């Protein structure tokens, strides 16, 4: 089964995370494939815009803790922490950069829960639409970590600093209606209408000439891009320092083992 399904046959292409048995969580290989798929569609002349979504009832649950547990079983806690710092977090950041810098309109279609990196991938898109059943959380704090995929920078851009700080510090879930109030998503629709609405939004963003959108996006995001890049670097450095702390390692191992056992 393809873990990332790509459709570039229409003017609006799509990239769909296809790991419903894992809550569409990502491994380094899967997250790399996600970024590369977005880039391929952006390089396809016939594709004017791209929708990112997920299979089933979850958009993306962030990291695949089962895969992380396998690394822990093989290499121990130090090996896992090295893996997070050297492999997993850099892979996630490469993909979120690809989405942020994409030269074509990128729409996130939240078909269900989006947590941690899953939410951050959506925040890096140009706009977001959610099914009424979707929920959102910056759940990194449960691991004692900061958002590695830029959430600490991106969430305040759309939700404002006070509300974003509350969500980042608490890890609390918000439902689709509250996400709409906060500006995390631009609209909410019935689950059965999500695909059509996302495609329409993508088509609307591709209304003008392709090069016009490239220049508009470059101008609109230009002032934020260096700050976003700095935030990604600082997030990586912060997490490398944090996972060296015993209390953070304990949280990571506890959450990883709990979710890994429940998913097997």
Image (cartoon, grey):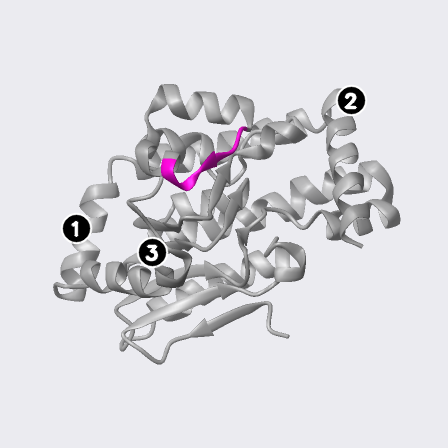
**Residue 65: which numbered mark, if any?**
none
Camera-nearest label, 2 or 3: 3
| Label 3 element class | strand
> Label 1: how many residues lie within 10 Å, few (<14), some (14-19) or many (20+)?
few
Q: Where is residue 219 drawn, in percent x and y? A: 18, 44
Residue located at (53% from left, 28% from top): 172
Say if 173 sits above or below 129 in the image.
Answer: above
The mark tally for this picture is 3
**How far apart are labels 2 and 3 at the CA level?**
39 Å
- Range of magenta residues: 172-177
* Residue with the mark numbered 3: 107
Q: Nearer the viewer, residue 100 or 169?
A: 169
Above or below residue 237? Residue 131 is below
Asked whether disc 2 touches disc 3, contact meaning CB atoms under 8 Å apart, the reply is no
- What is the number of the mark on residue 216? 1
- Distance from disc 2 to disc 1, alpha carbons, whole Å, reads 46 Å
Left of 210 or right of it: where is 116?
Answer: right
In the rendered image, the quadrant that contains the N terminus is: bottom right
- The spot of residue 241 in percent (x, y) is 65, 25
* SS under mark 1: helix
Q: Mark 2 highlights which residue?
A: 246
């Amino acid at each position: 089964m393809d873990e990332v399904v790509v459709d570039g046959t229409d003017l609006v292409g799509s990239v769909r995370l296809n790991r419903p048995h894992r809550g569409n969580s990502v491994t380094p290989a899967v997250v790399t494939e996600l970024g590369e798929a977005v880039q391929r569609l952006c390089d396809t002349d016939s594709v004017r815009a791209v929708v990112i979504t997920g299979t089933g009832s979850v958009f993306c649950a962030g990291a695949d803790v089962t895969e992380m547990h396998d690394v822990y079983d093989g290499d121990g806690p130090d090996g896992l922490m090295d893996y997070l710092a050297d492999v997993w977090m850099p892979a996630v950041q490469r993909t979120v950069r690809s989405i942020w810098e994409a030269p074509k309109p990128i729409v996130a279609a939240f078909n269900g829960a989006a947590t941690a990196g899953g939410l951050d991938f959506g925040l890096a898109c140009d706009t977001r639409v959610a099914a009424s059943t979707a929920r959102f959380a910056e759940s990194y704090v449960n691991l004692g970590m900061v958002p590695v995929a830029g959430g600490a920078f991106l969430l305040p851009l759309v939700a404002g600093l006070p509300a974003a700080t509350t969500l980042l510090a608490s890890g609390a879930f918000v439902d689709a209606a509250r996400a709409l109030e906060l500006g995390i998503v631009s609209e909410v629709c019935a689950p059965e209408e999500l695909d059509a609405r996302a495609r329409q939004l993508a088509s609307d963003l591709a209304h003008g000439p392709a090069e016009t959108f490239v220049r508009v996006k470059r101008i609109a995001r230009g002032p934020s891009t260096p700050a976003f890049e700095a935030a990604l670097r600082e997030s990586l450095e912060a997490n490398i320092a944090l996972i060296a702390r015993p209390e953070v390692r304990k949280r990571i191992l506890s959450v990883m083992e709990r979710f890994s056992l429940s998913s097997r």
